[in-house]
């Protein structure tokens, strides 16, 4: 699994002109699922996400986690995170999980975040979404379960 995590002061998802999810202070997570991922990767990545110290303490150092600030998470499925552009100019998505498996592990990841007592909003799986955010910092971190 791969996650692009952005520290935000607010973020939202709109589908067909209707806002379906929005959060305040917290993180926006763009989540990609790979073919060979399992619940193990979902749990590992969710725990890392919840405890990632990317919020500033009183001295201005990134030393506080999402849990510490009681922040929210907006999780959006994004298979394009497994786009491979090594050959040609058009990305290949052969490494991305098929939709049925991707949705299952996406939901598992969300549930693991909720198990950590994080308030979670989600995008709509397989929908054309408009994602808006205010990235604070900017702070953007890429996590890959294969590297944890």
Image (spheres, rainbow, N blue to C red):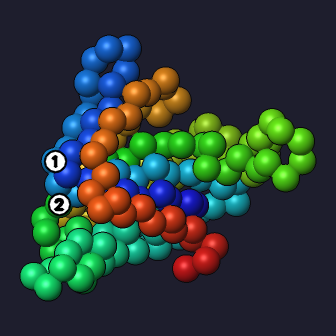
Question: Residue at 33% of width from left, 36% of height from top?
Answer: 132
Gap between marks 1 and 2 measured at Cα: 8 Å
Quick check: 53 above or below 84? below
- Does residue 3 appear left or right of residue 57 in this picture? right
Q: Position of residue 32 (x, y in %)?
A: 56, 51
Residue 125 can be seen, yes or no: yes
Of residue 136 and residue 45, the one placed in the foreground of this image is 136
**37 or 134, which lies in front?**
134
- Note whether residue 119 is visible: no
Q: Earlier in the sequence, mark 1 or mark 2?
A: 1
Q: Quadrant of residue 109?
A: bottom left
Mark 1 and mark 2 residues within 8 Å of each other at the beta carbon? yes
> Considering the numbered disc 2 on the image, is that residue within a helix, a strand or a loop?
loop
Residue plotted at (37% across, 68% down): 49
Residue under pointer 1: 24
- Give the percent coordinates (x, y) of residue 91: 77, 41
Residue ranking furthest to the left:
58
| SS category of the residue bearing label 1 | loop
Q: How many residues crowd mark 1 within 10 Å: few (<14), some (14–19), many (20+)?
A: some
Please tell me how crowded label 2 is: few (under 14), some (14-19), or many (20+) other residues with Cα within 10 Å: many
Instruction: Please name the residue shown 85% across and 53% down the image.
Output: 86
Q: Is residue 26 left or right of residue 99?
A: left
Is 71 positioned to the left or the right of 87 in the image? Answer: left
- Give residue 1's position: percent from left, percent from top: 57, 61
- Residue shown at the point (17%, 60%) measured from the top left: 71
Residue located beneath label 2 in the image: 71
Furthest toward the right, the residue is 87
């Amino acid at each position: 699994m791969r996650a692009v995590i952005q520290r935000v002061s607010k973020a939202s998802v709109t589908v067909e002109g209707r806002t379906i999810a929005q959060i305040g202070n917290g993180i926006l997570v763009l989540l990609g699922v790979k073919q060979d991922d399992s619940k193990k990767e979902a749990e590992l990545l969710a725990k890392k996400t919840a405890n990632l110290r990317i919020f500033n303490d009183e001295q201005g150092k990134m030393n506080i986690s999402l849990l510490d600030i009681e922040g929210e998470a907006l999780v959006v499925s994004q298979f394009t995170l497994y786009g491979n552009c090594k050959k040609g100019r058009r990305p290949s998505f052969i490494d991305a999980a098929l939709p049925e498996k991707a949705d299952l592990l996406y939901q598992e990841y969300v549930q693991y975040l909720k198990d950590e007592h994080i308030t979670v909003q989600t995008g709509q799986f397989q929908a054309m979404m408009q994602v808006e955010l205010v990235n604070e910092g900017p702070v953007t971190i890429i996590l890959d379960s294969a590297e944890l």
